[in-house]
Amino acid sequence: MRTERAATLRVQNLSKRYGSGETAVQAVKGVSLEVSPGEIVLIMGPSGSGKTTLLSMLGALLRPTEGRIELDGLVLSELSEGRLPDIRLRHFGFVFQDFNLLSALSALDNVAIVAELAGLGRKAARARARALLEELGLGARLHFLPEQLSGGEKQRVAIARALVNEPALLLADEPTANLDSHHGHETMRLLRRIAKEQGKSVLIVSHDARIQDIADRVLWLEDGEFKEMRSLATDPVCGMTVEREKAVSAQWEGKSYYFCCRGCREEFLAGPQRFGKATT
Amino acid sequence: MYVALHNLLHDRLRFALNVLGVALAVMLVLFLLGLEQGLRLQVTAYLRQAPGSIAVTQAGVDSFGGGSSLLPPGLEEDLRQVPGVAKVVPVLTQTAIFDLHDKKIFAFLIGYDPALGGGPWRIGEGREPRERGEVVFDRVLARLHGVRVGDTVEVQGQKFPVVGLSEGTASWMTALVFVRKADLESYLLTPGLSSLALVTPAPGVAPEALRARLKGLPGVEVWLKSELIESDLRLYQAFFKPVRLMSLIAFLVGTLVVGLVIYSATVERQREYGVLKALGARNARLYGLVLAQALAVAALGSLSGILLGFAAARLVLALRPQILVALEPGVVGLTLLTGLFMALLAAWLPARLVAGLAPAEVFRR
Ligand SMILES: Nc1ncnc2c1ncn2[C@@H]1O[C@H](COP(=O)(O)OP(=O)(O)O)[C@@H](O)[C@H]1O
Ligand SMILES: [Mg+2]
C-alpha cells in the first residue's frame, strides 16, 4: 500500500536575481502561487522567462533572493543549506527534460538508488523500485541500461525514480521536450494519473502548448512574472509555441496559421499540405 | 556503493589500463623500497651477526664499513680487565683486491680468530679457515666469478686457498671474505693489530652500563653495537637518497595515474553526480562514491603491483645475485599503505569538483 502523501505548496512574492551590479539578471520577480494536493499546474512561457529558475527554487535546488516557499507548514526558504538535500530527497520528485538517468546503472538500480539514499536497505529499495517500474509498464526492462531504452521508457524510469520516495510534489521541467508527440502525451497522461490517483501535486514547466489539456491550471510566465494567459498557437513548422498577437501569420484553406519567424512561414507556404494537418 | 563499481566497470578497457598504470607504479615503489631495505641489510649484515652488544673503534672513527680503524695495542687485554666484560672478540678489517684469472674483484677482508668468533655465521659449503692463508669466500661472489672450494685466489701475489663459501655475506658493494686474523696481520705486516673489538657483557650487566664503564679508555670510541649500525647506515645515506627519490617519483606517478583516471571519470560523469545531488544525495555520499572508485583502482593496482614486484625481485636475484631486494612484510605493508595514500590523494581533487557542483545545474543543458 502506498501512503497518500499530499501537501500544499505555497509561494509568496518569490524573486531571484542572478549576479549583481550591472550584469545582474532579475530572472523571477515577485511570483506568488499555490498548488493544492492532486492539482496539476502547468507553467508556460517563452524561453528565458524564468521557468526553470522558478522550478529550481520550488524544488529547494536554488535559494531565492527574496520571498517565501512553504510546503505543508515547512518554510523551505528559511531552512539551512544542510537540510535541503533531505527535503529534496523526501518531499520532491524531479523529472527532467533529458531524463538524467545514471548511464552505468540499470533501470531498476536507477530507481532503487534514490530509495537507498533515503535510507532504505538495498533489498527493500530494489523491491520497491521493481514494483513501481512494473506498475509503469517497464517490467520487461528492469535490467536494461538507459542507452538500451527508448525516450518514452527513459522518461517512465525517471518518473518511477521521482516517485520512489513517495514525495508530495512532482516537479517536471520540460518533461516532453525530448519525446515525440505520442510519447509526450503518454507521459503527460501518466503524470495526470499519478496526480489524481495518489493525490500528488504536479508542477510542470513547459513551452509545449500541446500538453495544456491535461493541466488543471495553466499559468503564463513572462519576464519573470505571471501574466495573463495569452492566446497561443503552435508554429506548424517548428512546433514552437507562439503568441498570436505577436506572431507572423498566414492563411491556408480558410484557416489561420502562426509562425515563430518569417523563415517558418515561408517554409510553410512553400508546401502547406505538408503541415496542414497541424492544429492552430 | 555499487554505483561506484558500475561506473568503473562501465568502461572496462579504461579500467584495465588504469589498474595496470597503478600496478606498475606500485611495483616500482615496492621494488625500490625492497632495494633500499636490501641495501641496508647488506650494509649492516656483519655487525648484526657479529657477537657482543658493544663495539669499540678507534677514536674519531664513526663507522665499521667506511673508515679504517686501528685500535691501540694491548686494548683487548685492557678490555678484558674491566669488570662486567664477559668476552672480547677482536677483528681486523681491510679492503682488498683479489686477482681471479684476469679479473680483479673488490672485497672486504675480515680477519678473525676462529676460536673467539666474529667470522662467517653461515657456511654453505666447505669449512672455516684452519691453516695459514685459508679463506672463506662469499658464495655469491664466488659463483659470479667461478671460484670454487679448493681454488686459490691471489692478493698482490700472495696465494689464499678457498676452503669455504659463506652465505648472507654478499653485497652490491664489497662482499665479505673471511681469513684468520693472524694471517691478515702477517699479510699486512702489522702483528697484533685490530680494527674493532666486539664486547659481550657478563650476564646481568646491561650493555649501556658497561659502555659507560668503558668510556674512560683512551684513544677509542665505545659504541652500543646498534648505534654503530645506525652510524654505518648514515654513512650510506648518500646511496639511499636516489633510491628514495625514485620511490617518491614512482609514488607520485602512481598517484597521478589514479588521480587523472578518477578525475577524468568524475568530470565525465559530472552531470550524473549533479543529478544525484539534485535528487538529494549529500556531499559525503558523493565523496564516498569518488573515493570508492579511487580505492578500487588503487586496491586492484596495488595487489597486482605487489605481485609484479615479487616477480621483479626474483628476476633481479637471478640476474644480479649480489643485489638484495628485501621484500619483507614491513616493506610490503608500507607499499600497501602507499597505494592507499595514492587513492586518498587521487580522490581529493575529484571530490572537490563534486562538492562544487550546484544542484540546480541539472536543469540546464
Ligand atoms: N545561473 C545563471 N546565472 C545567470 N543568469 C541566469 C542563470 N540561470 C538563468 N539565468 C538567466 O535567467 C533568465 C531565466 O532563465 P531560465 O529560468 O532558464 O528561463 P527558462 O527556463 O524560462 O528558459 C534568463 O535570462 C537566463 O539567462
Ligand atoms: Mg528552462
Image (cartoon, coloured by chain):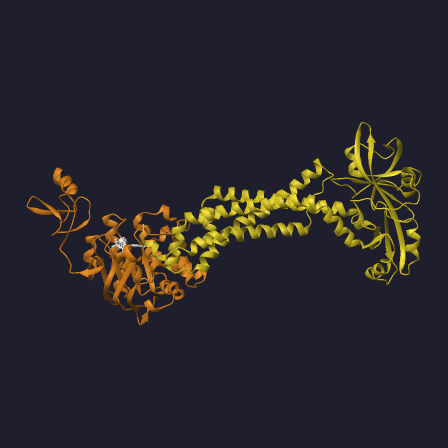
Chain colours: A orange, B yellow
Position above or below: B347 against A37: above
User: From the viewer's perspective, is B83 left or right of A200?
Assistant: right
Location of residue A54 by image quarter: bottom left
Toward the viewer: A259 or A200?
A259
Residue at 66%, 50% (x, y): give it.
B331
Q: Where is residue A27 in the image (x, y as percent from the top left)?
A: 26, 58
Toward the viewer: A40 or B101?
B101
The outermost residue toward the bottom is A73
Toward the viewer: B23 or A276?
B23
Res A106 visible: no
Position above or below: B48 against B157: below
Q: How many marks?
A: 0
Position above or below: A96 against B135: below
User: From the viewer's perspective, is B130 left or right of A188?
Assistant: right
Q: Position of residue A63 (x, y in %)?
A: 33, 62
User: From the viewer's perspective, is B353 left or right of B51?
Assistant: left
Residue at 14%, 56% (x, y): give it.
A230
Q: Where is residue A258 in the image (x, y as percent from the top left)?
A: 13, 47
Q: Position of residue B238 (x, y in %)?
A: 69, 44
Toward the viewer: B295 or B360?
B360
The outermost residue toward the top is B102
Res A202 visible: yes
